[in-house]
Image: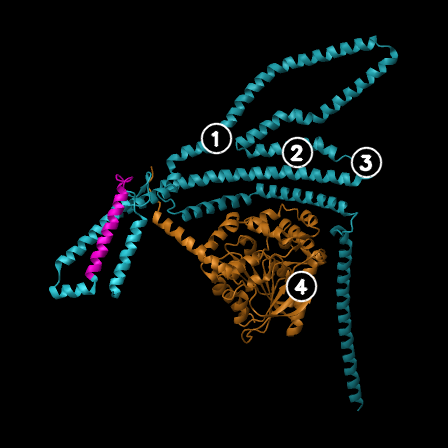
Chain colours: A cyan, B orange
């Protein structure tokens, strides 16, 4: 067997093996078009290879050439036909090969369809559609959704006020009744007690009254401002009112300073007095920092929200004029550039500079008091703290400065001495020369 | 409904290009060799405590006799002026035949917490100037101050005018009243005493870094890194990026004592232009500046307000003052093509005219 025959045989074997691998049980798949298509495809492939093998076999070529010494149009037509059939079958095979409703492969004529699907997918990100000027009304509603909650709040608040007004009358009467009833019961009871027992009832009552009065006084700033604080907070947050947010935090802090702040800053007792006081002081500074940082964050969030809305509007306007971004990159560049502008504008404002200054101060004050607390904790350990090093650092600094100054003075003195010596030497030489 | 202008093909191409860049960049990053900033050769000639005075090696025969001492800011490092081979302000000056000295302030530690403006200006700068005068056997030398170093230079030259031949100030704040740069607006409300105390008199470099990146939040925290992806397939551009990144975050701590006086006297009280500034027991009066002055500032400087620099001529005692606005930013003054084409030739030719 010559080389070409071996090659054709090998190809034929490969084809048979391949066919075996993909062969189907015909009993179970008579109606299965895709499988038939595949078998047809393999058959055509076999025919194609057989024919190609026959035509390219040097012995056949020789025979054919001997028989027909001119271009064989029949052979050419056969090759063309076989090629056409090959591609038709190939096309049919992929056309019919499907899994459920989703085609895994498309026939050759369907690439446009694939591209369209791809395009359709990306068009979902078309900012032109997302930020269409016509949907601004919807976006406005989305931005102002919190106003719905604000209106709900106002509705319930009004209802509550009306209800409370009615209740206040009854409550006052009720309190008067309780007080009168209590006094009457107490007086009756006291009057009935033997004189020596009265003390055991009267003194605890005084203590209780005092306790009640202290607690009422302590919480009074909170209870009297409760409604005001609630209004400022809700209307500030939901109504996008930055002034009210600021007022809420200010009122909260004022009330804290009037109540818990005083308690926290009152003198401590006992051997741990200093550490306790320092703990309280650090906590008090923490509250300051917390209050200001909350106000700072609220303002920053508010600015970002406003900037977001304005940028969306700007983009919608661009879109209306047909000047919207054509790519993701263009859109991102527009968005980030505008956001930077809004933030930097706000960062440069007097309002931001002031609150940044306040925030910085409160953070540093907390840090200072917390550092002192840490140093107090560490004072009993062998660890040297930065605070303890301070006097040594100052001494070294002063000494170094003194040494530098003294060195300079020595240099000046040396230089003066040298100048004087040179002058004297010059004078002596001159005198000697004169004498000579 | 609007028309559809979304360019699918261009987006697809950009997405593919980006992925290619990232894949190429992976290999580039693995093999990246980021050189330390500061490429020109220099030798240590003098020093005290942590500060060092260097003299650059000449790259050509000196054509100008009077040396130039560069005084950089205490914030960040002076290596920015000599960052990369193809973009070095120092190299451009050396190639033009200048004899260049530079002060390296070093990295202050807690034992430096009492060093004040008096020590920096009447101490280190004055000692450096005296050293150069002595070694070059000249009564006067040229002073070139950059940013905060420019303010130091102006103050120094006003106290010791007899030692300075020509003064060059670059991106230098003089009038601290404008608020068109964020640091100027914030500085007026900053309780720097508290900041110093909270950090035991040594404010960490990261504290300053965070403030600087907030000056352009999107550009410096996000976009810069997105733009970097564009250069991932370009090893040279990546190397330059990393070198710049290294420089940006290589921030020495700030000595509280100095920072307090600088912020309170200048940002808050604007004492220099009012003639009320004292360095130690010496008054820094800008009217004493009678030497020729070259003042250069960046049109797009977001760190030092251009308004703060441009009116320097109103406060000095000389009419021989030139003011130049360069269409670049604070850093671009030293590491941009404009630096090479405009800034360095301007400085050299100005000095040459006054040699």
Q: Is residue A260 above or below residue B193?
A: above
Same chain, labels 2 and 3: yes
Name the chain letter of the residue that bears numbered label 4: B
Q: Secondary structure at mark 1?
A: helix
- Give the Cα separation between the discs numbered 2 and 4: 47 Å
The mark that comes first in sequence, 1 or 2, is: 1
**Left or right: B177 with respect to A368?**
left
Question: How many C-alpha atoms fall within 10 Å of the one at disc 4: few (<14), some, or many (≥20)?
Answer: some
Q: Is residue A54 magenta?
A: yes
**Left or right: A219 with respect to B62?**
right
Judging by the rendered image, the residue that carries numbered circle 4 is B51
- Give the Cα separation between the discs numbered 3 and 4: 50 Å
Judging by the rendered image, the residue that carries numbered circle 2 is A253
Question: How many C-alpha atoms fall within 10 Å of the one at disc 1: few (<14), some, or many (≥20)?
Answer: few
The quarter of the displayed image where residue A96 is located: top left
Along the line of sight, the residue nearer the viewer: A103 or A358: A103
Q: Secondary structure at mark 4?
A: strand
Q: Is residue B273 above or below residue A242?
A: below
Disc assigned to residue A145? 1
* Residue interval drawn in magenta: A26-55
Residue A222 seen anywhere in this rendered image of the structure: yes
Name the chain letter of the residue that bears numbered label 2: A
Residue at left 55%, top 44%?
A347
């Amino acid at each position: 067997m010559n080389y070409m025959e071996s090659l054709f045989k090998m190809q034929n074997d490969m084809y048979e093996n391949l066919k075996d691998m993909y062969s189907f049980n015909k009993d179970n798949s008579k109606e299965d078009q895709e499988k038939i298509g595949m078998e047809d495809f393999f058959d055509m492939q076999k025919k194609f290879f057989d024919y190609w093998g026959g035509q390219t076999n040097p012995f056949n070529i020789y025979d054919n050439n001997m028989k027909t010494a001119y271009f064989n149009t029949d052979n050419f037509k056969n090759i063309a036909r076989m090629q056409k059939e090959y591609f038709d079958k190939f096309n049919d095979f992929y056309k019919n090969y499907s899994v459920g409703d989703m085609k895994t492969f498309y026939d050759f004529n369907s690439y446009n369809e694939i591209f369209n699907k791809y395009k359709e997918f990306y068009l979902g990100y078309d900012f032109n559609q997302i930020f269409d000027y016509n949907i601004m009304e919807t976006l406005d509603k989305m931005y102002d959704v919190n106003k719905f909650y604000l209106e709900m709040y106002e509705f319930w608040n009004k209802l509550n006020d009306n209800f409370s007004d009615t209740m206040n009358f009854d409550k006052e009467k009720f309190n008067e009744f309780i007080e009168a009833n209590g006094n009457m019961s107490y007086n009756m009871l006291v009057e009935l007690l033997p004189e020596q027992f009265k003390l055991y009832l009267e003194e605890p009552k005084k203590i209780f009254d005092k306790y009640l009065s202290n607690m009422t006084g302590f919480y009074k700033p909170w209870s009297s401002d409760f409604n005001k604080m609630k209004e400022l907070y809700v209307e500030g947050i939901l109504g996008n009112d930055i002034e009210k947010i600021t007022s809420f935090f200010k009122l909260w802090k004022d009330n804290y300073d009037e109540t818990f702040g005083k308690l926290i800053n009152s003198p401590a007792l006992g051997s741990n007095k200093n550490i306790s006081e320092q703990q309280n002081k650090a906590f008090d500074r923490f509250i300051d920092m917390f209050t200001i940082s909350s106000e700072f964050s609220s303002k920053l969030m508010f600015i970002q929200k406003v900037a977001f809305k304005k940028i969306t509007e700007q983009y919608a306007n661009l879109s209306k004029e047909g000047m919207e971004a054509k790519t993701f990159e263009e859109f991102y560049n527009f968005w980030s550039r505008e956001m930077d502008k809004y933030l930097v504008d706000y960062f440069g404002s007097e309002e931001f500079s002031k609150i940044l200054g306040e925030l910085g101060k409160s953070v540093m004050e907390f840090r200072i008091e917390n550092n002192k607390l840490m140093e107090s904790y560490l004072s009993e350990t062998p660890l040297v703290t930065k605070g303890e090093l301070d006097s040594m650092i100052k001494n070294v600094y002063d000494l170094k400065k003194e040494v530098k100054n003294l060195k300079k003075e020595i240099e000046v003195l040396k230089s003066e001495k040298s100048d004087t010596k040179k002058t004297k030497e010059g004078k002596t030489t001159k005198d000697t020369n004169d004498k000579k | 409904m609007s028309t559809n202008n979304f360019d699918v093909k261009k987006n697809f191409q950009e997405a593919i290009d980006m992925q290619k860049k990232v894949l190429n960049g992976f290999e580039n990053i693995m093999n990246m060799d980021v050189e330390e900033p500061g490429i020109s050769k220099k030798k240590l000639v003098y020093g005290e405590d942590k500060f060092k005075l260097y003299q650059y090696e000449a790259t050509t025969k000196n054509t100008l006799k009077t040396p130039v001492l560069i005084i950089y800011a205490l914030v960040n490092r002076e290596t920015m002026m000599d960052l990369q081979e193809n973009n070095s302000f120092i190299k451009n000056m050396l190639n033009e035949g200048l004899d260049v000295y530079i002060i390296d302030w070093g990295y202050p530690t807690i034992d430096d917490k009492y060093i004040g403006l008096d020590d920096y200006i009447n101490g280190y700068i004055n000692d450096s100037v005296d050293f150069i005068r002595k070694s070059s056997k000249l009564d006067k030398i040229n002073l070139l101050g950059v940013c905060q170093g420019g303010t130091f230079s102006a103050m120094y030259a006003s106290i010791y005018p007899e030692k300075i031949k020509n003064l060059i100030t670059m991106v230098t704040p003089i009038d601290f009243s404008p608020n068109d740069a964020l640091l100027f607006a914030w500085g007026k409300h900053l309780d720097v005493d508290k900041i110093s105390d909270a950090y035991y008199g040594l404010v960490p470099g990261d504290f300053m870094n965070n403030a600087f990146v907030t000056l352009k939040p999107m550009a410096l925290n996000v976009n810069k890194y997105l733009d970097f992806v564009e250069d991932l397939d370009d090893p040279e551009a990546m190397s330059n990026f990393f070198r710049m990144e290294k420089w940006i975050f290589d921030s020495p701590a700030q000595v509280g004592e100095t920072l307090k006086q600088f912020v309170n006297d200048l940002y808050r009280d604007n004492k220099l232009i009012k003639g009320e500034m004292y360095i130690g027991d010496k008054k820094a009066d800008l009217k004493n500046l009678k030497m020729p002055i070259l003042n250069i500032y960046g049109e797009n400087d977001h760190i030092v307000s251009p308004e703060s620099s441009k009116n320097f001529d109103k406060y000095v005692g000389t009419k021989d003052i030139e003011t130049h606005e360069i269409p670049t930013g604070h850093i671009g003054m030293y590491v941009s093509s404009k630096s090479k084409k405009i800034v360095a030739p301007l400085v050299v030719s100005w000095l040459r005219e006054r040699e």
